[in-house]
Amino acid sequence: MPSNEQRRQTAKRKLERQLERRAERDRKRKQMTIGASVLGVVLVIAAGAVLYGLTRSDDTSDATASESTPTQESAAGEMPTARAEALPATVDCSYTPDGQAPAKPATAPNATAVSTEGVAEVTLATSQGTIGLNLDRAESPCTVNSFVSLAQQGYFDDTPCHRLSTTGLMILQCGDPTGQGTGGPGYGFVNEFPTDQYNPEDSNLEQSVTYPRGTIAMANTGQPGSNGSQFFLVYDDSPLPPMYTVFGTISEEGLATIEKVAAAGDDGSMSAGGGKPNTPIQIQTATVAA
């Protein structure tokens, strides 16, 4: 039978492990991550699939030490292809200060009478080649409005694409001037398409859908209203829960640029999955067509 001293030592070690896990979760909350939804864990069966970080707030026993490793589903469903009902010609948006200093000087855009019509063409001139973006206002007008405003302010100029994934999720993530995955413009806004096509209580929000090759979508922290400036470019079909706002498509030239970077792989340095591209890619300028 264990002595009192042995029981105290066992309890002490258990407490230390819990505190270590809690500190690790707190650290991960500070990073913008793709691959997890606030509503739950996305399960994965596919062999060799990369794990993406989901931070949970509960303290549990040693049996759940891998609690922050959700994975992808073996078969993803289809993302809605269009809104069930078209938006009015203009909408009002909400850009709320997030309590953090902007990673680079920026101001929130006009939030009233935002157009839902037409496509905004943005050209990212990068150190590895051109990436053309066609941003769909009818799909996600508040997101497009913010992205265009930041581009016009020069927020994306001279900033790195800090994260690449080449296993499971095929994405290049950009939009953080710090290059650490923690920076934003100092404000946040809510998800749009396809999240807003689901009832908030719909369990399908927890199930993977296919984000198709050529999609541009917003990264977020998994918390409501946490979209900011970080975005990811999908260079091959990737399964994710529909909790990441889709707001446009990537040109074929742009996909070729991203694929060239992806071919060199990443350094595996990020706990949430993937890492810095082995072939660095810097956004030199982001230009909005007149």
Image (cartoon, rainbow, N blue to C red):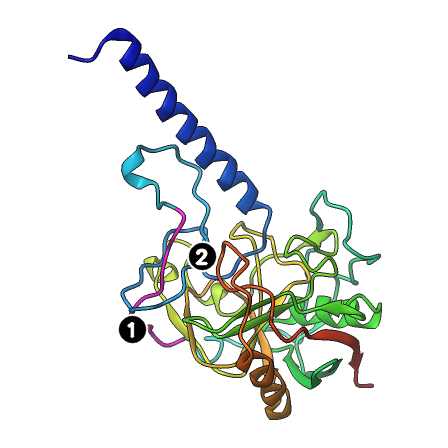
- Residue type at numbered disc 2: Ala
Count residues near mark 1 (Cα–Cα under 10 Å), then give few for <14, some for 14-19, many for 20+. Answer: some
Picture quadrant where residue 156 is located: bottom right
Q: The C terminus appears in which quarter of the rendering?
A: bottom right
Residue placed most toward the observer, 257 or 105: 257
The numbered mark at residue 75 is 1
The numbered mark at residue 284 is none
- Give the overall secondary structure of the magenta segment: loop
Instruction: Provide the residue designation for mark 2.
Output: 36
Residue placed most toward the observer, 268 or 103: 268
Task: Pick out the residue farthest to the top.
Answer: 4
* Mark 1 or 2, nearer chain start: 2
Residue at point 51% right, 52% down? 222
- Residue type at numbered disc 1: Ala
The stretch in magenta equals 68-79
Residue at point 20% right, 13% down? 2
Picture quadrant where residue 47 is located: bottom left
Task: Pick out the residue farthest to the bottom.
Answer: 252
Task: Pick out the residue farthest to the left.
Answer: 1
Residue 9, horizontal then vertical, whole percent: 34, 16
The Cα atoms of the two marked residues, 1 and 2, are separated by 16 Å
Q: Report if residue 77 lies within the magenta region.
A: yes
Residue 116, horizontal then vertical, whole percent: 66, 76
Count residues near mark 2 (Cα–Cα under 10 Å), then give few for <14, some for 14-19, many for 20+. Answer: many
Residue 135, horizontal then vertical, whole percent: 65, 79
